[in-house]
Amino acid sequence: MTRDEQLKERWIKTVAFFQSKFADGDEMDLDAILFIIGVQELGQLHRKFKKDEKLQLMHIAICRVLEPYGYYEFSHFDDDKWPHFTVKEKLPSLKAGEQSLLMKEAIVNYMVTNEVID
């Protein structure tokens, strides 16, 4: 199996996992998955979030899934227990499709590392 085929198969498993747990089988996009990862990383699972907090949750998820790639590094938790990251390396300029592919790969790696999918 090629790397691309493996990524595609694992992405399908990842989306299926999130859809079954959080969307009653409805389709979920990349942003929705990032939001859920952000909530998981924050650890405040059963509360409502304001619009600006939802954006911050997506940022937490992006930092967390790209951390193994060397782009971000965990810095600290603030007084409200929100995680903060520092930029280690600037993200490369990527076209939209390349950005999507990088994020899908990073999310899949996050899911594999956390033993949610194989």
Image (cartoon, rainbow, N blue to C red):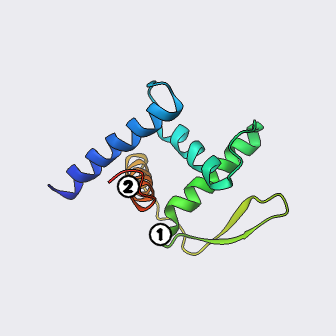
For label 2, the SS is helix
How many residues crowd mark 2 within 10 Å: few (<14), some (14–19), many (20+)?
A: some
For label 1, the SS is helix
- Amino acid under disc 1: Pro
Does 4 sit above or below residue 64? above
Q: Residue at x 64, y 47 (%)?
A: 39
Q: Residue at x 50, y 63 (%)?
A: 66
Does 68 sit above or below residue 117? below
Relative image position of residue 82 (x, y in whole percent):
75, 58
How many residues crowd mark 1 within 10 Å: few (<14), some (14–19), many (20+)?
A: few
Mark identifier at residue 95: none
Single out the residue that lies furthest toward the left.
Answer: 1
- Amino acid under disc 2: Glu
Does 43 sit above or below residue 13? below
Quick one: label 1 or label 2, which is nearer the N terminus?
1
Residue identified by numbered label 1: 68
Q: CA distance from mark 1 to mark 2?
A: 11 Å
Q: Nearer the viewer, residue 115 or 39?
A: 115
Relative image position of residue 44 (x, y in whole percent):
71, 48
Mark identifier at residue 105: 2
Determine which quarter of the picture holds residue 9.
top left
Determine which quarter of the picture holds residue 53.
top right
Quadrant for the C terminus, please: bottom left
Relative image position of residue 92 (x, y in whole percent):
47, 65
